[in-house]
Amino acid sequence: RYKGLLAMMISLPACKQAQSLLNFPGGLQMDQFIPWRQKDKVVIVVGATGSGKSRLSIDLATRFNAEIVNSDKMQVYKGLDIVTNKVKEVECRGIPHHLLGVIDPDVDFTSDDFVRHASRAVDSIMRKGRLPIIAGGSNSYIKALVNDDTEFQSNYECCFLWVDVAMAILHSFVSKRVDQMVDVGLIDEAREFFDLDANYTQGIKRAIGLPEMDEFFRNESVVDDETRARLLKAAIYKIKENTCKLASRQHQNILGLQNQLKWNMHHLDATEAFLKRGVEADEAWKMVVEGPSTEIVGCFLND
Ligand code: ATP
């Protein structure tokens, strides 16, 4: 009992070395005497745009009683659900999502804002006895939270899952996704955000899909049909090109987190699932992404 008491007294970070000098009987660990020193656990899902982060985080959330904190720079804003490719309600399978479509589209939501909001969301999920899963493509947000915020570092232990897809396959996937977005209303949605003095360096206006459509919206009502069709085709081509560039840049940034910051990422290669269609694709996803991730997170939580 006295050792437990002593351990409590020296549990401050400054006394870390002293803790390691304590010799507990029967192989007992420090954390067993002072349970609050054990860090809470958080899962972080990273990956380039289109790689399947949302799908994986929802798969995991249904298994581990979790809630999801969005870390996509553009999806935090209200509006542009198609352009920013927000997860649809039916795809959420009842899993609560935080920081998704809640920020005023005109304000600049900074990394500091993300750290504050995300920490609050993670805390509230913890208080419900659930597992927080942070998922999204914005690596600068994730880095600010995990690497630069000392409070987060001292409170949480992270398990990183990286959903990766061979870049050529991902480029072809996100290009087709743009066509699908156009089919379900991307152009009308983007038009609502168009104005003649638009500033594409602020808030949601930075989203890929708005600056690219600018020339088309400026001219669509004053040009002939042929020119109109040409301008639209050029805009869609540019959206595809910029989405592919974003995917490549995000991939490089994740490599940086792994190689320079030495984050221990669990790499999940989802390429096989992207090469198949229908039921076969779903089976491949389970085999190469969902199954291994479930095992990794299970071990992490039981550790
Ligand atoms: P960077 O330092 O390049 O901003 P980051 O990791 O902070 O990188 P990313 O998520 O890679 O942030 O976003 C970079 C840019 O890509 C955004 O400013 C925006 O133009 C575009 N973008 C990101 N996510 C989306 C999205 N969901 N929809 C449309 N455009 C997006």
Image (tube, helix red, strand yellow):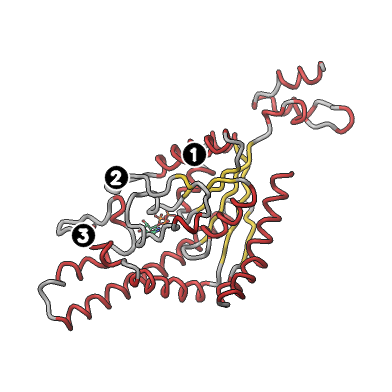
The answer to whether the residues at label 2 and label 1 have Cβ atoms under 8 Å apart is: no
* Residue, far left: 222
Mark 3 Cα-neighbour bin, 10 Å: few <14, some 14–19, many ≥20: some
Residue depicted at x 41% and y 44%: 111
Mark 1 Cα-neighbour bin, 10 Å: few <14, some 14–19, many ≥20: many
Q: Position of residue 127 (x, y in %)?
A: 57, 33
**N-term-proximal mark, 3 vs 2:** 2
Between 184 and 302, the one lying in front of the other is 184
Between 75 and 198, the one lying in front of the other is 75
Task: Give the CA distance from mark 3 to mark 2.
Answer: 16 Å
**N-term-proximal mark, 3 vs 1:** 1
- Residue wearing tag 3: 194
Is 288 situated left or right of 101 in this image? right
Indicate which disc residue 270 carries: none
Snapshot quadrant of residue 184 = bottom left
Q: Is residue 74 above or below residue 132?
A: below
Task: From the image, state whether disc 3 or disc 2 is nearer to you.
Answer: 3
Residue depicted at x 51% and y 38%: 149
Indicate which disc residue 107 carries: 2
Ligand 1 sits in quadrant: bottom left
- Residue wearing tag 1: 121
Residue depicted at x 53% and y 35%: 123
Residue depicted at x 55% and y 69%: 165
